[in-house]
Every structure is written in structure tokens, then in C-alpha cells.
Amino acid sequence: MAATLAGRHIVVTRPAGQAEALCEAIEARGGIAVRFPLLAIGPAPDPAALDAVAGRLDQFDLAFFVSPNAVERALGAILARHHWPARLVVATVGKGSEKALRAFGFTDVIAPQTGFDSEAVLALPAFQADAIAGRRVIVFRGDGGRDLLGETLTARGAQVEYVTCYRRYRPDADARALVEPARAGRLDAITLTSSEAVGNLVEIVGAEGLAALRAVAVFAPHPRIARLARDAGFEQVVETAPGDAGLLQALESHIPARLG
């Protein structure tokens, strides 16, 4: 593989355990992946809620998983003790979540093929009012998050129930791992792949640290994340295509390799 990112220091901010594929792809192109998780994933604050819903899945018509974490946390617990009802349709958003569902044996998954957010899901035929009205929908998600999907489905006549199957929190991190290289001119890019990551970064580095990072190019795979990064004060924000492929393509296009 061509060393298109040779010598470039690129920060990967995904949670530990979910960052390696992108880090390895950066390193395969000669780059230096700087692992700096801005989000941590932990068990649900109330695991009893997931246990309770597992025994009545046959009451629902559609199960929606908001992320790979939701797939792994929910199905890991449910399928250990229960069979998945044959009539319960599975839906999600994003290639990562589709891949996670395939790992559990789900091949017939409703998901948008373009667009990777709630708006793209809501545009699908299966989620239109004439298809969803009167249906019972269970949404597996982390604590909090956007309510657009559930609110819109409710407005379209569906009965929506949420189950929290994991929690997200800001990890302990040493801001100096980013701020000092940035001040020395040894930080070339920061990838931000969630809205929460932007806020967590600002809180971790503080105002003084943010001033040192503002000139570092930020790469974000969604307009909402890009907007938050600009609002935080970053001067160079590149909105990329979705997923690792989109991030890598943009990194290669905007950051020339260091030669010699």
C-alpha cells in the first residue's frame, strides 16, 4: 500500500476497542495513529431493564439498534438466554452496525444504503406512516442520545419503547498527550466521529489547550459533528464521507505525506 500518510500524526478518538481498524489503516499508509479515546463505553446503569424486555420480544414488530455497541451489548445478553422471535424485524443505521448484526447471524436487515443518521432511516419505506402506524418498535440504545427517531415514529403512529443497554461517559485522559505535540507542530489531524467526542475534547483540554489545538485540521464524517467542531473554535474542519473509508480518503486528500 502506498505511504500516503507517511510521517503524519493523526489522532483517533474512538472508544478503546473500536479504534483499531482505523488506526491500522492509518499505519498501513505510513501514518502514526495517536490513540486518544474521547468516549468510553460501559454496562447499562440498570441491566434489569434489558433482562425484562428480553422475555417479551415477541410483543414487538421491529427492533432498531442505534449502533454497534447497542447490537453487541443487547444481543450478547438476550441471545444467551432467549431465542430471537422469527417475526421480529431488525433494523439499524451504519455499516458498522450492519456488520455487527451479521456477526450474530442477522442477514435480512433494514438499513439505509446512503446517509448514516436518523434522517436517513426515517426516509426508508419501512418507516413511513403507512408502513409503521400501529407497529410496536423497540429501540436498543445507549443512555441519552437523539430522540428524533422515536419521536418521529410515534408521530407516524408507531408505539415506541426504549431500552438502555450501555452507557457512554468521558474517560480520564491527559490533555498533555495532545496539547504538547500540537504546540510542537507534531500533530497533523484529529478525527472526531461523534458529537459527544467534540464536547468531551473541549472539556478535557480546557481553554488553554483548545487554543493550542485550534489550528490542527479536524476530520468529521457527519455535518452535525463538523458544525460542533467549528462552533468549538477549530479553524480547519473537513467534513468527510461516512465511515473509515470516508475518513481515510479525506485524510489522504488533505494531508500530504512527509517525504524524507
Image: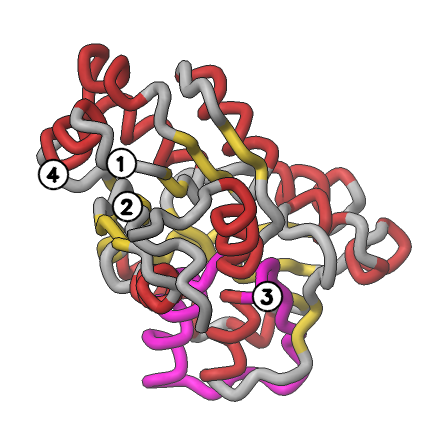
Residue at x-position 44% and y-position 44% = 193
Q: Earlier in the sequence, mark 2 or mark 3?
A: 2
Given this view, does label 3 or label 1 mark the residue nearer the observer? 1
Q: Is residue 18 visible?
A: no
Q: Earlier in the sequence, mark 4 or mark 3?
A: 3
Q: Residue 63 got which mark?
A: 3
Q: Earlier in the sequence, mark 2 or mark 1?
A: 2
Q: Give yes or no for contact between labels 2 and 4 (Cβ–Cβ under 8 Å).
A: no
Magenta stretch bounds: 66-95
Q: Say which residue label 4 marks.
A: 172
Q: Give yes or no for contact between labels 2 and 1 (Cβ–Cβ under 8 Å).
A: yes
The image quadrant where one finds the N terminus is: bottom left
Residue at x-position 34% and y-position 55% = 6
Up/down of 177 relative to 179, above or below = below
Q: Secondary structure at mark 4?
A: loop
Q: What amino acid is at disc 4?
A: Asp
Q: What amino acid is at disc 1?
A: Leu
Question: Quick check: is 124 in the magenta stretch?
Answer: no
- Residues 140 and 226: in front is 226
Say few, some or many: other residues with alpha carbon within 10 Å of mark 1 (under 14 / 14 to 19 / 20 or more).
many
Q: Secondary structure at mark 2?
A: strand
Q: Say which residue label 1 marks.
A: 187
Query: Cα distance, mark 3 to mark 1?
Result: 42 Å
Q: Say which residue label 2 marks.
A: 9
